[in-house]
Image: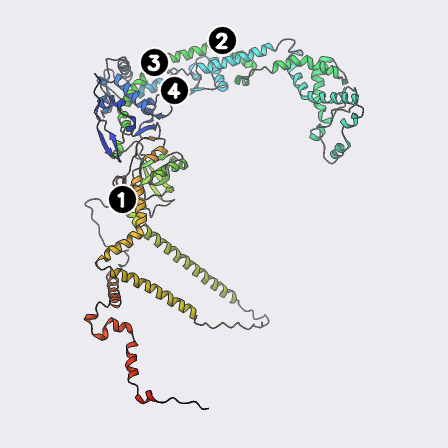
Amino acid sequence: MSEAAHEWRFFRAGGFDQVLLTSGEDLANLHTLDQKLWVALACPTKGTEIDPRTLELIDLDGDHRIRPPEILATIEWAKKVFTSLDVLFERAPALSMSSINPETDEGKALASSAKRILKDAGKKGAKTISLADVLAVESGLTATRFNGDGVIPPSSSDDELVTTVIEDIIVTVGSAIDRSGKPGVDAELTAKFFEQARSLVKWDDEGASESRCPLGPATAAAADALTAVETKVVDYFTRCRLAGFEPRAVTALAASDAELTALSDHELSESSADVARLPLARIEAGKPLPLDAVNPAWASKIKSFNDLVIEPLLGKRASLSEADFEKVVAKLADHRAWRTTVPLAAVEKLGLTRLREIATEANETAIVALIERDSALKDDYLAITSVEKAVRVRRDFMVLLRNFVSFADFYQRKGAVFQAGTLYLDARSCDLCFLVEDTAKHTALAGLSKAYLAYCDIKRLSGEKATIVAAFTAGDVDNLMVGRNGVFYDRKGNDWDATITSLVENPISVRQAFFSPYKKLIRVVEEQVAKRAAEKEKEANAKTDAAALHAVPHDPAAPPAVAAPAAREPEKKIDVGMIAAITIAVGTVGSLLALVFATFIGLGMWMPFGILALLLAISGPSMLIAWLKLRQRNLGPILDASAWAVNGLVKINVPFGGSLTKLAKLPPGASRTTDDPYAEQPTRWWLWITLSVVVGVLLLWLLTSIFDGLLPPKFRAKELFRGSAPSAAPAAASAPPAAASAPPVSSPK
């Protein structure tokens, strides 16, 4: 019969279901929970509020990241060393000895190591063991010469010669870091050093034969002298052979007149490249190389070749034939070939003399013995490490699970491990802050969170510097700008100076989006007014400067200047076209306002809905965009940018966002005085409201004649609106009849 499935319990937060871990049974069955239901799939070992050492002990592959297999492996290990996984839910400051499993090999070894640690700490028979007890013994072991890591620093040996050999190994082939933090050597580096040293010494011994050292110790210098001139000497003899083959080639192969003429235009020396390119000596058929009459640029090298090679091998002579030159090359060929087989070894820098002294079997044996002595304590150190891991896992593992398998600590506002601290800025506090290593890289991904982010450089008086990003999830953004300063408090309570360096702008609330168009309009108007005022000020300054230039003091001794006739200022005339344009504009605006007002009046009882429609037409688009972005706001991209691998959609809705950013407000029960000696004079709103009502009533009366039934005929809107047109007809009717019937006057012929 198959085992019954474990009954899981979930809680909903952030828009998705998250598992509840409340007992050791939940942990024991965590391997059966589908990893698609885990909130995170990876997190870094650094940059969180969990002790990095704890995460290093859980990080089994040492890649500085925690993944589900390592979480599950830690649970399996805990099942073997603890009597119950419920121990991991305890919040006691120390590990009880009774919670160690006495039935398993791992538990027995852990209990034995814990008792030994307590004994070394002077607490034999204690019922609990703390992290401080473990670290005290561990630091004592680390500080000793032998600490079980298989690495020995130079100070590990009492023999001065062995100490210097260890130092030579570190200088040549590298070092390993001992647990004490000092550089040292291990078995691999030691073997590499002595292998290279013996190989180089063996190679040097092989070159000591007579065929490879025809000149003894001077053979190496002779070979170098030959190499320095060989190409040029071969070139000389080749030219001479060509001259013997074709006599006309003598002129072509020798220095040309053009080359010699070009040399006459320069200051020459033996090191000149143009001189060095000329033939080694005068070209003649079958002519040997004259050793004392060669190209000046090669004279010193030929002399060294003669002193170190020719005279020791062939005897003293004034010239060198091609056949003798080939003999010299042949005598040194074996040595030169041997030199090409030199093993490439880092130990070569010590020199063969030093290597012959220290590359002995006795020295290697002594160093290997020290390494083995150190490695023999490996089990003791591992035992201490296992106790340290047990104490740390009992203390920190559930904190990790509540921030990995689920985000319980985050949504219960207990302080998630990825929250770096709290930023105080612009009359609010932001709890959602993260450490950032690369701002540019972080911004590219974190911007997808749809949250309003402020990147800040933080620093302390001690010189510590870092970068954080804070999510603003409540309030407005009017006063958030690059350069603003605040204070950041990390999780340890340390305070840092914080300065905004960049912003990722996104909506904070629908309310802010409602007022956004009007604020933008006010800013545009303010900018235009400021621009126009600046232009007027510039024009006024220009006129003042011009007036100052004309007001130059007159010198009485100077002859009177003939004043030029002043230009007559043209008379200002009324611009009829401008007046007409202004009249038309005013009429158009007035008609438009009248039309809008009449439209609203025509709505009757639906007038409030018309006003609401106008407001929605202006603010609706920005509110809709804000609503859509706020629905998409989530923590995932920010954590992914911080090297996490978030598996779920960790939403930050408006109510939850409001709890992450707190606005300034008076504490409960506080009192305040309202007498502000510097308060601005209050605006007489009642006067403006009264005037608005009067103007509205007048417009309503003139446009709709709604009050005509209550007024005398001569005060009715229809009569007043007609103006003087109704009185023109009676005046025409009262004219004398005779005037009306008078015959037309005929014009004189």
Residue that mark 4 sits on: 179
Tell me how far mark 1 sits from mark 2, CA to CA. Answer: 75 Å
Tell me how far mark 4 sits from mark 1, CA to CA. Answer: 49 Å
Camera-near label (4 vs 1) is 1
Camera-near label (1 vs 2) is 1
Say which residue appears at 72% left-offset and 22% top-offset: 235
Residue that mark 2 sits on: 361
N-terminal label among 4 and 3: 4
Residue that mark 3 sits on: 379
Secondary structure under badge 1?
A: strand
Picture coordinates of residue 426, whole percent (x, y) = 31, 45
Query: Quick one: 668 or 356, which is closer to the camera?
Result: 668
Secondary structure under badge 3?
A: helix
Picture coordinates of residue 385, whole percent (x, y) = 32, 18
Q: In the picture, residue 324 is in which quadrant?
A: top right
Q: Is residue 172 above or below residue 43?
A: above
Secondary structure under badge 2?
A: helix
N-terminal label among 4 and 1: 4
Q: Is residue 313 above or below residue 399?
A: above
N-terminal label among 3 and 2: 2
Q: Are marks 4 and 3 in contact (CB under 8 Å)?
A: no
Residue that mark 1 sits on: 663
